[in-house]
Image (cartoon, rainbow, N blue to C red):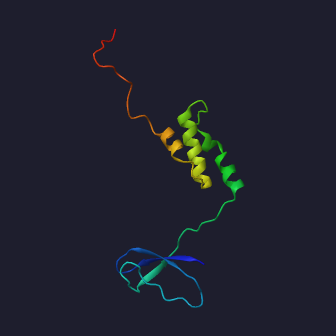
């Protein structure tokens, strides 16, 4: 079932149309202004990757640049990136580990520094 993209010649907005049947489909219209004056656009296509191909892509040196295995935030960012690539939700604990601490160093009131 292909998706086709059209640009409206009246309002100039883009519409996406799912074609369920190539033999019995209605003529395309703009989903914004309902104009029948649309032209089909060339659009990108998606190609699903296997899990092995995704893991192989993640192991490329460009994806490992800046990774410091001794830095928990660096590892957390990498794990989040891997989870996003694999379609896994790694939970809020990982998101909290990535966020920089908003509070600065703890300062005590009424103490003088030496």
Quarter that holds the C terminus: top left
- x and y, in percent, of residue 62 in the image: 61, 43
**Outermost residue, bottom side:** 24
What residue lies at 56% left-to-right and 40% top-to-bottom? Answer: 76
On screen, residue 53 above or below 16? above
Residue at 29% x, 19% y is 109
Q: Is residue 71 left or right of residue 53?
A: left
Q: Is residue 12 left or right of residue 41?
A: left
Q: Residue furthest top?
A: 114
Relative image position of residue 31 (x, y in whole percent):
41, 79
Which quadrant of the structure image shows residue 2? bottom right
Q: Is residue 27 left or right of residue 103?
A: right
Q: Quadrant of residue 44?
A: bottom right
Q: Quadrant of the N terminus?
A: bottom right
Residue situated furthest right in the rendering: 52
Query: Looking at the image, can residue 66 be seen?
Result: no
On screen, 45 above or below 78? below
Q: Position of residue 73 (x, y in %)?
A: 53, 36
Residue occupying image coordinates x 58% and y 42%: 78
Q: How many marks?
A: 0
Q: Is residue 8 above or below residue 75?
A: below
Location of residue 35 in the rendering, given as x and y in whole percent from the top left corner: 38, 85
Residue 22 appearing in the image: yes
């Amino acid at each position: 079932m292909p998706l086709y993209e059209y640009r409206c010649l009246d309002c100039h907005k883009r519409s996406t149309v799912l074609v369920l049947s190539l033999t019995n489909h209605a003529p395309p219209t703009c989903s914004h202004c309902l104009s029948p004056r649309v032209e089909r656009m060339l659009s990108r296509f998606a190609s699903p990757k296997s899990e092995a191909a995704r893991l192989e892509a993640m192991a490329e040196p460009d994806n490992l640049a800046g990774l410091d295995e001794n830095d928990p935030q660096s590892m957390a960012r990498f794990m989040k990136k891997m989870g996003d690539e694999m379609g896994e939700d790694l939970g809020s604990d990982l998101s909290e580990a990535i966020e920089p601490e908003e509070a600065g160093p703890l300062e005590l009131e009424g103490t003088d520094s030496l």
